[in-house]
Image (spheres, rainbow, N blue to C red):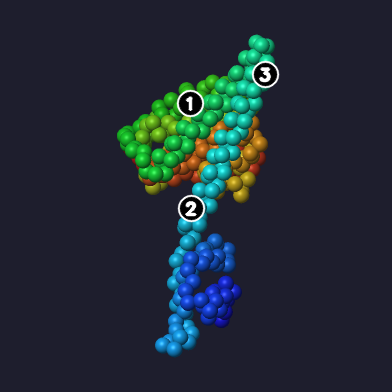
Amino acid sequence: MEAFRLQELAEVTRRLQKEPVLSGLELELPGMDERWLQVNAASVVDRDGAHRGAILVFHDLTRLKQLENTRQEFVANVSHELRTPLSLIKGFVETLLEGARNDPQLATHFLQTIEKHTDRLTFLIEDLLTISRLESGGTVMNFQRVELREATQRALDDLQSRGEEKEVTIENSVPEGLVARADAERLHQVLSNLVENAIKYGKQQGRVAIGARLSEDDKVEAWIQDDGPGIPPDSRERVFERFYRVDRARSRETGGTGLGLSIVKHIVQAHGGEVWVKSEFGQGSAFYFTLPKG
């Protein structure tokens, strides 16, 4: 107790008076940071069998504990994300089988809803596979010179109908001739995810601006700015976590898998870049990322 100030270790040494060996004991160290140790202990005895001391061997389990917690949280989140659309699909199918299929207008509405949620499941599975490949290093990047303004415009063309639905003005202010070294397909995924989020969480009849420049350290720096509600300070460091949602109720309403920003982070990091967000609550958000210069 004088050396470590840990009641659990004092208890271990007391037990060694009666038990010769103790193994696999787990101990959480007090303090601000989570720290776990595995303790294996053996009693030291003399020729007469008298207790003379103890040997304790410690293994740091902190990383394993963190990975286990991450795994449990991931499984719980995936289960929840799958259960919600499956429950809705099952409910609509049961209603159709019970007679709603005989009402053409009602049946069409139910089938459209079922299609919407099967699409949601498809997107979730595709995103899960993508993030699994990125995290395991199983995705091979095809690096090439990519003209950033053209790449941005391709993403905006794909999302034109989304912008028109909310009457959002989208400005492509990326300068001509700015070239990055990137995988064109993965860069398209990054831009599409960030612009789609800006449209989704921005104002009705709002504005989304995309810009880029060559930074002082000779990297290509791009950003996507929206005029939405912004992100609270305690959420800014967590928005790139898998399944993290600033506003869960609104996210459920607008759809999405909760994996988009995590995929963005992994793709940018695979390019040797960084991604971050600047936001003032109530004044919109700007997502930034860097790429090597082409």
Image-quadrant location for residue 134? top left
* Nearest-to-viewer mark from 3 and 1: 3
Secondary structure, mark 1, is: helix
Residue 148 pos. (x, y %): 40, 32
Q: Which one is earlier in the sequence, the residue at label 1 or at label 2?
A: 2
Mark 3 residue type: Glu
Residue farthest to the front, as pictured: 48
Q: How many marks?
A: 3
Q: Residue at x 67, y 21 (%)?
A: 95
| Residue contact at pointers 2 and 3, CB within 8 angstroms | no
Residue 165 pos. (x, y %): 59, 21
* Nearest-to-viewer mark from 2 and 3: 3
| 82 and 97: which is toward the camera | 97
Give the residue pinned by disc 1: 156
| Residue 98: image tag | 3
| Residue contact at pointers 1 and 2, CB within 8 angstroms | no
| Residue 67: image tag | 2
Quarter of the picture containing the C terminus is top left
Mark 2 residue type: Leu
Mark 1 residue type: Leu
